[in-house]
Image: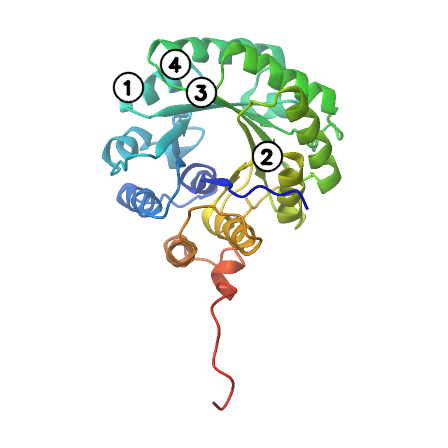
Amino acid sequence: MLLPEEVNVIDVVCRDGFQMEKEFIPTEEKINIVNQLSQLGFKRLQVTAFVSPKAVPQMKDAAEVVRNIERKPGIEYSALTPNMKGASAAIEAGVDALDVFMSVSESHNKANIRMSVADSVNAIGEVISLAEKHDKPVVINLATCFGCPFEGDVPKDNVIKLAEDFLKMGVEGIVFADTTGMANPRQVYELTSEFLARNPKANTILHFHNTRNVALANILAGLQGGVINYEGALGGLGGCPFAPGASGNVPTEDVVGMLEETGISTGINLEGLIGLAQYLEKVIGRTLPGQVMKAGRVCDLHPMPGA
């Protein structure tokens, strides 16, 4: 198997996980979880979203979170920003980087942000220009790269073309997101290997949901396709509110556990990550879907019965 020696894992639970929760998570708890994640070896954390508080009440404290987290050198703290208003607020609050997003499919983009694909590209172009003036890198998150719940198949060529258009616009990274949990390993390998063959220097990131229980298999396919950056959410919390049935980000601790056991270094403290996932479960107040947080590390041996 052609696998990398090192992989960068990014946690997005404080945005992509929290945004789905109906009960408001106290601001100090959000800050606490960011601070604890910061101690575990991550190089990038998505900590909140600057969106309409009417649309996503959970993110109404975005500026307070950004201003009060304990910054650790070497970590890039980013926030999701859907438009110029959100981008301006995020920059004013002091984020290190902006994450912008849109869907590749027209119908999901309209359901999610009420814009056509063309209009979204133009709007994101304005955000990129603003970010450049403030020396803030931008990462574009492309949703529905592997399928749309309203349209079905999303042509690979459409995904690659849109990603290359954004590279020309100056984005720092491209996230190919399986927003709807429709991806399969062969599809992932074909998209990533072709994209990286055409754009070998592109900072490429994969984001999978475990909706149909194949997220880890898709990550393995992405590794073979040449991708070394992956997003996950602590405990497997979250999902997409505009993709029917697409709940459940791949748990960060499950990703780290698989990679480390495969001999791929992540630089992340898995034991600490498991403990934090178990803590998050208490904060949320229900059982979370992560498996490694329940089973523990492979190296965690147990005494024989009766010994």
Q: Position of residue 13 (x, y in %)?
A: 44, 42
For the residues labelled 3 and 4, say whether their Cβ atoms are less than 8 Å apart.
Answer: yes
Work out whether mark 4 precedes mark 2 in sequence or the reverse, and give the earlier one: 4
The residue sitting at 63% across, 17% down in the picture is 162
**Residue denoted by label 1:** 92
Work out whether mark 2 precedes mark 1 in sequence or the reverse, and give the earlier one: 1
Number of the label disc, if any, that sits on residue 227: 2
- In depth, the one of 131 and 189 nearer the eye is 189
Instruction: Classify mark 2: helix, strand or loop.
Output: loop
Say which of marks 1 and 3 sits in front: 3
- In depth, the one of 168 and 63 nearer the eye is 168
For the residues labelled 2 and 3, say whether their Cβ atoms are less than 8 Å apart.
Answer: no
Furthest residue toward bottom:
306
Say which of marks 4 and 1 sits in front: 4
* Quadrant in which residue 163 is drawn: top right
Say which of marks 2 and 3 sits in front: 2
Instruction: Classify mark 4: helix, strand or loop.
Output: helix
For the residues labelled 1 and 3, say whether their Cβ atoms are less than 8 Å apart.
Answer: no
Number of the label disc, if any, that sits on residue 138: 3
The residue sitting at 73% across, 20% down in the picture is 157
Q: Amino acid at mark 3?
A: Val
Q: Position of residue 4 (x, y in %)?
A: 57, 41
Whole-Å distance between the Cαs marked 2 and 3? 19 Å
Q: Is residue 49 above or below residue 9?
A: above
Instruction: Classify mark 1: helix, strand or loop.
Output: helix
Number of the label disc, if any, that sits on residue 131: 4
Q: Amino acid at mark 4?
A: Ala
For the residues labelled 4 and 1, say whether their Cβ atoms are less than 8 Å apart.
Answer: no
Q: Amino acid at mark 2?
A: Val
Q: Amino acid at mark 1?
A: Glu
Work out whether mark 2 precedes mark 3 in sequence or the reverse, and give the earlier one: 3
Work out whether mark 3 precedes mark 4 in sequence or the reverse, and give the earlier one: 4
